[in-house]
Image (cartoon, grey):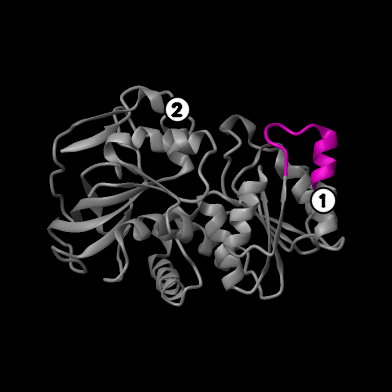
Amino acid sequence: MKALQCIELGGPEKLVVSEVPDPIIAAEHVIIEVRSASVNFPDVLMIQGLYQFQPPLPFTPGGESAGVIIEIGEGVESFKVGDKVFAATGVGGISEKILAHQSSIRLIPEEMDFEIAAALSVTYGTSIYALKQRANIQPGETLLVLGASGGVGLATVQLGKAMGAKVIAAASTQEKIDICIENGADEGFVYPSGNLDRDQQKELSNTIKELTGGMGPNVIYDPVGGTYAEPCLRSIAWDGRYLVIGFAAGADQIPKMPLNLTLLKGCQIVGVFWGAWTGLFPEENQKNFDELFEMHKAGKINPTPSDKFTLETSADAIAHLKDRKAKGKVVINFQ
């Protein structure tokens, strides 16, 4: 079978599509014939050796995929050959076949396309957990989404609206803001790209305060980090929840926050580690996905991919995300 391989650490240009051995079935695992996979920012970091969890070389990137089960191992009781599923495996997804533990897969509705399922699993799974379990967001509260035009960003924009929040989108271009408005954001603003100097940080904080009538957002969703974090925290509302999702600005730019702000604002800085939570609370995670499927059926969320690639061009898909060209979810279709 063919798979995208990271043989040496570096940029997407070092990735190659090559023949690799078929996976061998194991107890409590299934083998999935992959129909679609999607790309997330951890893939960009992982191939460079910058992610907090680093698989040994060589490895296949791709944390989420969707397809059909073609073989089941001993001890698998909830799935059968022929089931349509998606898998959140962390790695290995950009491959024609993947071995997945039964705890990492979910049945998908029969009417749902594979690319929709691949686009939904990690981004929407992360975002509903962040807003529901970690932030306990309430109808009428204000939600600020940084990096709002990316995969998790747009998922959060849509979910925030579905949960009754006022959503403010922040992104690096007006084109990206327009996409966020199309996806349900109430308003948005453009922030500068790169490292912000002190004046730019003050301007960012003031912009957020102005858009919220001086009150600040109740919930801030931050997958970016870097020099954006502190000015956003300074703008947060009393009793606000600052959600730490990731560090797309770079692993070398993980922000150091002045903790006195949590005292002055009566706010919380809340870590969001969806992958660990799913292992600890699988039943709650399943309830979240049941809710996501219902939202999708009702038209409240729309995980339609914005950029599509093939296995042969899958390295370009990761480069597309790395270069900040993505305006939504990036998927790789196999058939």
Identified at 31% across, 27% down, the residue is 57
Q: Secondary structure at mark 2?
A: loop
239 sits to left or right of 7: right
Q: Nearer the viewer, residue 225 or 190?
A: 190
Write down the residue under mark 2.
48
Residue 290 occupies which quadrant of the picture? bottom left
Bounds of the magenta span?
Answer: 191-204
Q: Nearer the viewer, residue 326 or 240?
A: 326
Res 77 seen here: yes
Determine which of the numbered discs, if any, sits on residue 95 in the image.
none
Which of the two discs, 2 and 1, labels the residue nearer the N terminus? 2
In the rendered image, the vertical position of residue 86 relative to residue 195, given as above or below: below
> Which amino acid, mark 1?
Thr
Q: Nearer the viewer, residue 148 or 55?
A: 148
The quarter of the rendered structure image containing the N terminus is: top left
CA distance for labels 2 and 1: 34 Å
- Disc 2 vs disc 1: which is toward the camera? 1
Determine which of the numbered discs, if any, sits on residue 207 in the image.
1
Residue 304 occupies which quadrant of the picture? bottom left
Q: Position of residue 48 (x, y in %)?
A: 45, 27
101 sits to left or right of 309: left
Q: Position of residue 163 (x, y in %)?
A: 59, 73
Identified at 72% across, 43% down, the residue is 191
Question: How many labels sit on residues?
Answer: 2
Check residue 223 for magenta coloring: no
Q: Position of residue 205 (x, y in %)?
A: 81, 48
Check residue 192 for magenta coloring: yes
Q: Position of residue 125 (x, y in %)?
A: 46, 60
> Which amino acid, mark 2?
Gln
